[in-house]
Amino acid sequence: MQRAIFTEEQQVFRDMVRDFFTREIAPQQSAWEHAGAPPADFFKRVAELGIMGIQIPEVYGGAGESTYKFNAIVTEEAVRAGLQIGSLRTHLDMALSYLLAYADAEQKQRWLPRFVAGDLIAAIAMTEPGTGSDLAGVRTTGTRADGGYVINGSKTFITGAVNATHILTVVRTSPLEADGDRRSGLSLIAVETDRPGYSRGRLLEKIGMKAQDTSEIFFDDVWVPEENLLGEEGRAFAYLSHNLAQERLSIAVNAQAAARFALDTTLAYVRGRTVFGQPLAALQNTKFELADCATDVEAGQAFVDRALDDHDAGVLDPADAAKLKLFCTQMQGRVVDRCLQLHGGYGYMLEYPIARLYTDARVTRIYGGSSEVLKSVISKSLLRAAEAGEQ
C-alpha cells in the first residue's frame, strides 16, 4: 500500500538521510557495537545536516518545523540502514520535547543554539534501581542549597549517557509523605555531566542493541543552580505524562520500521536459498508465513501513519499511544520471530541481519511502558469512556 502522509519536501529529506546513513554511517555499525556506543562526532555530523534543529524555532538557529514526521523519517531510515541510533532518538524525540515545552526564555537561549550545533547532547534520567515503570517511587533527591539544588541518588538504564552533556533528571524535591500523593514533589532538573559529583557507571551488557549505550549514572552531592530547573518545582510527573504520547509513538515507529526491514531482508533470503532442489520462496509454508508477516506489517504501517497525523494535529492521547505501542511492538516480535524461522539455522548467526533484529526486538515490549502497563492504561481509558457514556 502507498503511504500518503509525507510531503515532497519530506521525501527529499528522506533521500538525504538515507544517503547519509547508508554511505557514511552503516559501515561503522560494527565498530559501534564493539565500543558499545556511537562516537561523539556522530552527533556533530547529524547536526551538520540540519537534523538537530528541525523542530527548534528559527530564532535559535533551527528550521522551525512543528511536525514530528521528520523525526519519524530519521528513525525509519536508520532502521533501513541496519543502524541502532537509540541515543539520538532519546536526544531528538524525548529530551528536546521537554526543552521546547518547559524551558523558559533564558534556558532556551542558553541551550537550544548549542542543541542545533550538536554541542549539547541530552539524555533523560528517570528509571532507578528497583522502581522500573513506577516513576512515583523516585528516590533521587534534589535538596535546596545555595541558590540551587544538591542532587543525590542513582539512575539506571540510561540511554545516551556516554555522550550526554546534559542529563534531564527526575528528582524528588519534596519528601514523600506516607498518606500523600506519591506523584507530587517530583521535579525535572538539567544536570551538566561535567559537574563535580556526577559520574557514569559501567556500560550495561544487553542481549541486543549493542551499539545503543545503556548506563548507570550516579549523583554524589551534585550542586546545580536553580536556573537549571525545568518548568515548575513539583510538576515533573505531569510533564512526563504529557510527553508519553510522543515517546511511545517514537518506539512504535522504530518497531514498525524494524518489522518491515525484517520482512524485506527475509524476502531476499528466501528467494536466494535453495531447499530440496527449489527456491525456499517456492514452498507453500514460506508463502503463507510471508503473507501473514506482510499483512501484519501493513496493518502496523496504517496504525503508525494515522498516529503520526494525529500527533501533528495534537489529538494523539496517551491511551491511543499506548494502543499503538502495544500493537506495533508485539507485531514486531511476531514478524521478526517468523522471519528468523524462515532463515533456519542461518537466522541464528550474527552475520545475518535477522539475528540482530531478533535480539533488538525483545526490549521494545518493556521500555517506554511495558506491555502489561499499557494494557492497564488502555483498559482504564475504556472503562472511563464507558462510564462517561452512561452519564
Image (cartoon, helix red, strand yellow):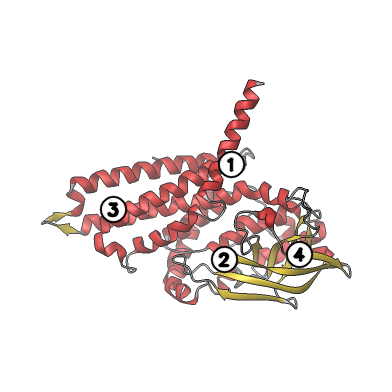
Of label 2 and label 3, which has the lower sequence position? 2
Mark 3 — residue? 267
Q: Quadrant of the C terminus?
A: top right
Residue 150 horizontal side relative to residue 30, left or right: right
The answer to whether 302 is drawn above or below residue 352 in the figure is above
Question: Is the residue marked by circle 2 packed among few (<14), some (14-19), or many (20+) residues within 10 Å?
Answer: some
Of label 1 and label 2, which has the lower sequence position? 2
Q: Secondary structure at mark 4?
A: strand
| Image coordinates for residue 354, horizontal then vertical, percent | 35, 60
Q: Residue at x 58, y 70 (%)?
A: 215
- Residue placed most toward the observer, 192 or 305: 192
Q: Which mark is residue 377?
A: 1
Q: Which mark is residue 78?
A: none
User: Do callouts 2 and 4 mark residues in contact (Cβ within 8 Å)?
Assistant: no
Residue 244 seen in the figure: yes
Q: CA distance from mark 2 to mark 3?
A: 31 Å
Q: Residue at x 37, y 49 (%)?
A: 334
Marker count (numbered): 4
